[in-house]
Amino acid sequence: MFKAAACLLAALTVPTPPATQLAPVVITARVGQEDGRPEVIATLTSDNKPVANAGVAFQLQRSFGELALGQDTTLDDGTAAAALPKELAPNPDGTWTFKIAITSPDALAGQAQTLRIQAPIVATGARQSALRELWARSAPWSLLITVLVLAGSAWIVYGYAVHQLHLIKLGGQDVQDT
C-alpha cells in the first residue's frame, strides 16, 4: 500500500512537459492577377513552412475606414487570395494598405498584419473614372454637394414631421393667434 501511494505521489509531482507553442505566423502579400482580374495574394508561413487550411480575412484601408475584400482558406502552399475591384484607386503615393488577419484555426486566430503594397500602374482613363466615385480619395465637389443636398432635404422633412407631431401633442393649438 505504501508503494502504491508513493507511485501515485511520484506521478502527481512529475512535471508535465509544456504545451507546444506555435511559432508566430509570418504573413506576406503581393498583388497578382487571375483571369485578368487583380487580386491580393497572402502567403502564411510558420518556421519557414507554409500554413495550410487557415482562414484569412482581407481588408483594404480607405479614407472612410476598412473595406472588406473577402475571406479565403490557405492552400497547401500557404497562399490565400481575395479579388480587388478593377478600378480601385490607390493611395496618393501609389500604394494600397491591406490588413490581413487569420480567422481560423483558433490557435492562430487573431494574428494580423498590416502591409503596404505598391499598386500596379493604372491606365489614365480607368484612374479618371475611379476618381468620380464618392469613396475616392478626393471625390468631386459636385458629387459631394449632391449627396449633402439630398441628405439635408431628408433631415428637413424629418424635422418638419417632428414639428407637426409636437403641435399635435400641444392639443392642436395653433401657434399663430389671429
Image: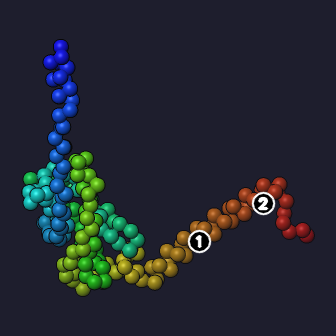
Task: For the C terminus, give its image quadrant.
Answer: bottom right
Q: Which mark is residue 153?
A: 1
Q: Residue furthest bottom?
A: 124
Question: Who's the residue at 84% across and 63% down the image?
Answer: 174
Determine which residue is flagged by label 2: 167
Query: Residue 38: which quarter of the image?
Result: bottom left
Q: Which is nearer the eye, 23 or 107?
A: 23
Give the amino acid at mark 1.
Answer: Ser
Mark 1 nearby-residue class (10 Å; few <14, some 14–19, many ≥20):
few
Q: Which mark is residue 84?
A: none
Q: Which is nearer the eye, 131 or 7?
A: 7
Q: Which is nearer the eye, 152 or 51?
A: 51
Q: Residue furthest right?
A: 178
Disc 1 element = helix
Question: Who's the residue at 18% across and 67% down the image?
Answer: 29
Q: Is residue 65 left or right of residue 1?
A: right
Placement of 166 over or under 136, stated as above or below: above
Q: Residue furthest top?
A: 1
Placement of 57 over or under 12, stated as above or below: below
* Among numbered discs 1 and 2, the one appearing first in the sequence: 1
Task: For the N terminus, give its image quadrant.
Answer: top left
Q: Is residue 72 left or right of residue 174?
A: left
Disc 2 element = helix
Percent of width and height locating residue 138: 39, 82
Percent of width and height locating residue 72: 21, 55
Question: Who's the residue at 28% across and 72% down the image?
Answer: 97
The image shows a total of numbered marks equal to 2
Percent of width and height locating residue 166: 75, 59
Can I make out residue 173 in this image?
Answer: yes
Placement of 147 over or under 124, stated as above or below: above
